[in-house]
Image (cartoon, rainbow, N blue to C red):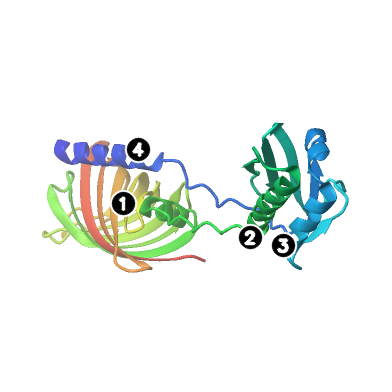
Amino acid sequence: MRALVSLFFVACVFATARQSVAEPPAAATVDVVDTPSVVRISFARNAAEKLNAIRLRRLVELQLGAELAVDPEPFGPLDENVIRVFIELETDTLVRVQAQAPGRRLESRPVDVEGVPWEVATRFVAITASELVKSQATPPRKPRPRELTPFERATLEARVPRFEVSAALETGYWEAADEAVFGSRLRVAHHTYWVSESLSFAALAAPDGSVGYDLDLVALHQFWIDPSFRLSPGAGLSLFVTNLSSTDESFRAASRVHAIGQLDLRIDDDTWFRLAVEPGLTLDPELDAVNFWMTGAAAIAFEAAP
């Protein structure tokens, strides 16, 4: 008995640790922005003094073709869907070109113009600006969705409310009768993420011919380890009616309080195989006695979302 209780306790602690893992993050949402069709080019004062702005815009326009239009003005509304290019002179021989479209990362590239006439440098800068604009105009590649881990899939499935019907073969020992009991149990249950409730009815019999009937109400929590395996500890209270012996025609009632531990293995999408153990005590008011009760069961459970 102590070995069973210890095993059940270790399983509950293990399942609790697994359940405490953070829930899978929701997929990030990205604002969808239409591809810009206009380019605005502006210059820092030192770059405007060296480079021919009109010629540079014309060269960029020729490089881009008809897909993108280069606006002759360097400024416009702040919420305008355009690709903005900024050109500055970092040193006397190094030009910095920066480009950015809405919702995209800033791209920056240096252009070394040492020993080159500024008319030729204008062409080099225009080529670099055109390359950055084309890069910014290309729609960003959608990231490949990350596949959920088995535990994350189980966590998502556990959040869906479900109804259950199960049938079990049950055997156990009741100290008051000092005999093994055998029978079957029919259970209906409702599962939510935090609490599962179930109501069951069992008919039990002993080898001496005595019979008993058990109406049980249970509350438990399901710890999903992965989509095909879960542990469910809980507690229950039941009304047990028995005649204790085959020669006793009068039945009397006793209440039963018990713990419950379930191990569920998935067979298919809606079907589970279950092993359960229920250690507990019966309270017999007629005999003013408390007796030990222990049962184990193997069940087939069918689950479906409403």
Q: Are marks 4 and 1 in contact (CB under 8 Å)?
A: no
Identify the amino acid type marked 4: Ala
The alpha-carbon separation of the residues under discs 3 and 2 comes to 16 Å
Look at mark 1 in the image and give the residue it sits on: 240
Mark 2 nearby-residue class (10 Å; few <14, some 14–19, many ≥20) = few
The alpha-carbon separation of the residues under discs 1 and 2 comes to 69 Å
The alpha-carbon separation of the residues under discs 4 and 3 comes to 58 Å
Residue 290 at x, y = what percent? 25, 37
Q: Are marks 4 and 3 in contact (CB under 8 Å)?
A: no
Residue 218 at x, y = what percent? 39, 49
Q: Secondary structure at mark 2?
A: loop
Q: Residue at x 32, y 59 (%)?
A: 228
Of marks 1 and 2, the one in the foreground: 2
Look at mark 2 in the image and give the residue it sits on: 139
Q: Nearer the viewer, residue 110 or 155?
A: 110
Of marks 4 and 1, the one in the foreground: 4
Q: Residue at x 23, y 57 (%)?
A: 297
Identify the amino acid type marked 1: Phe
Q: Earlier in the sequence, mark 1 or mark 3?
A: 3
Look at mark 3 in the image and give the residue it sits on: 64
Q: In the rendered view, would you say 228 is above or below 102?
A: below
Residue 45 falls in image quadrant:
top right
Residue 267 at x, y = what percent? 29, 67
Look at mark 4 in the image and give the residue it sits on: 17
Q: Are marks 1 and 2 in contact (CB under 8 Å)?
A: no
Mark 3 nearby-residue class (10 Å; few <14, some 14–19, many ≥20) = some
Report the side of 222 relative to 41 (left or right): left
Identify the amino acid type marked 2: Pro
Q: Earlier in the sequence, mark 2 or mark 4?
A: 4
The alpha-carbon separation of the residues under discs 4 and 1 comes to 35 Å
